[in-house]
Amino acid sequence: MTAAASARDRVRLGRSIASRLAASTDASAAFVAGSSVVGLGSATSDIDVYLVGSPAGEERQQMFADTIRVDVTHVRLDTLESLVDRVLGTDLRSDHAGRTLSDREIALTVRLLTGDIVTDSGALAALRKRLDEHPLRLSRLVMNVWILAAFFAIEDCLGLQRSDHPNDLDGAALAGRRALVCAGKALAAAGGDLYFGEKWVWRQLARSGPDGFPFAEFQRLLRDDPLAVDPQAGLTALTSFAQTCLIATATLGWQGVGVSHWPAWPAGSGPLRRSPTFFPRAYDDMVTLVEPAGRHFRLPPDVALVWGLSHGLSAPSVTEYALGLSKEASAFAALTEKRCRRITTELREAGLLTEQGGQWGAM
C-alpha cells in the first residue's frame, strides 16, 4: 500500500493493524480514529489506533506500514470513563474562570465518539451511548475551544492593527486570517462537525456548514491579501466575518438550533449595526460580549441573539427574525416584539449597537 492510498484503504489498514495488535496485547477493545475515518484525510494522513485496556499501560508507539505512519496509543479504560464523566459533568458558566478539560482531552473524546470500533467488550459502545445521549455537552466544549481561539487571534489582530510599527500589519493579517479560520471551525462544530484540525475547516464547512453560508466569501477573505488596497478595511473585513460566525455559533449553535436558521451572513444595508469591537464568548448561562482590552457585558442568550441579528438590518426586521427564532429554543422563548424593542434600545445605550440616522428603519 502506498502513501497515495485512498481514505477507505487507510481505514481498512488501520482496522487490520488494530485487530492484530489488540489480540497480541490482550487489549479489551480497540478503535481507529483520525481524519480518514471521518471522511477527511489526505494522501499523507496517518492512521491512529487506540488500544484500550492493554496490559502495556498508557504509552504511545509509532510504526510504518509501507510509507503510511501508524500512531498507536495504549489507553486505560478507566481513563476514557473518567474523561466521559468529566465531559458530561462540565458546566461552562460565565462566573467560573478557566476550563476543566484540556483541548487534547476534548479532542480525544471526539475521537472516541467518531472513531471506528474494531473490537469491543461493550465498554466503548456504552461510553459512546452516554455521549450520544447528551450531544450538546461535547459539542459545546468543542465550540468553546474554537470560540476562545478565535477571540485570542482577534485580540492579536486588533492590537497589531493599531501598532505604529509597519511590519506589525503583516502580523495583524496573519492573526486576522487565523481568527476567521477558528471562527469557521466553531461554526462547523455548531453544525455537528466536531473533528479537530484547522486545515480541514474548508472541507468541514463545505459539507456541514449552514445553508446559505457564503462559502465563496469565506474562501476569498482567506486567500486575498487584506493589506493590498486598504489595510484597515481588509483587516476589519476578516474580523467582521469572524464576528458573525462566532455570534451565530454562540447563540443558535450553543442552544442546539441549526445554524442554517441564521438569516443574514453578509451585512445588510439597514440602519442597525453591531459594534465591530465586541466579540462573543458563550457559556451555559450567558453570552459574554468582550471588547479586547476593554469592556465586557454579560447578556442572556436572547439578548445576545438580538445583538447578533442587528447586522445591517432595520429594527422591525431584527424583531421579525428574532420572533421566528424564539420558537426554536427555550432560551429564546421570552422574545416578544416589546422585548425586542427594549433590548435594541438598551444595546444602543450601552454602545453595543449603533443606528444610522437614528430612526427605526422599515422592513
Image: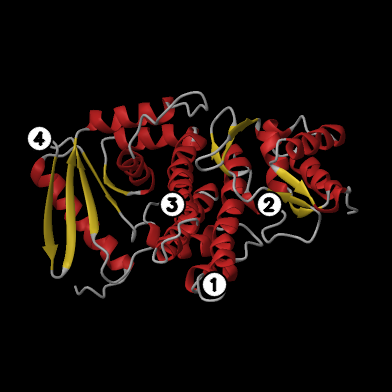
| Quarter assignment of residue 47 | bottom left
22 or 190, which lies in front? 190
For the residue carrying disc 2, how many other residues have a C-alpha within 10 Å: few (<14), some (14-19), or many (20+)?
A: many
Q: CA distance from mark 4 to mark 1?
A: 51 Å
Q: Earlier in the sequence, mark 3 or mark 4?
A: 4
Q: Residues within 10 Å of mark 3 (few under 14, many from 20)?
A: some
Q: Is residue 117 above or below residue 212?
A: above
Q: Residue at x 48, y 73 (%)?
A: 223
- Examine the rendered structure and indicate whether residue 63 appears above or below residue 222: above
Give the Cα distance between marks 4 and 2. 50 Å
Whole-angstrom CA distance, mark 2 to mark 3, is 28 Å
Checking the image for residue 220, the label placed there is 1
Count how many numbered circles sit on residues in the image: 4
User: Could you tell which of marks 4 and 2 lies nearer the N-terminus?
Assistant: 4
Viewport quadrant of the C terminus: bottom right
Quickly name the residue at label 2.
262
For the residues carrying marks 3 and 1, which lies nearer the camera in this image?
3
First reached walking from the N terminus: tag 1 or tag 2: 1
- Amino acid marked by disc 3: Asp
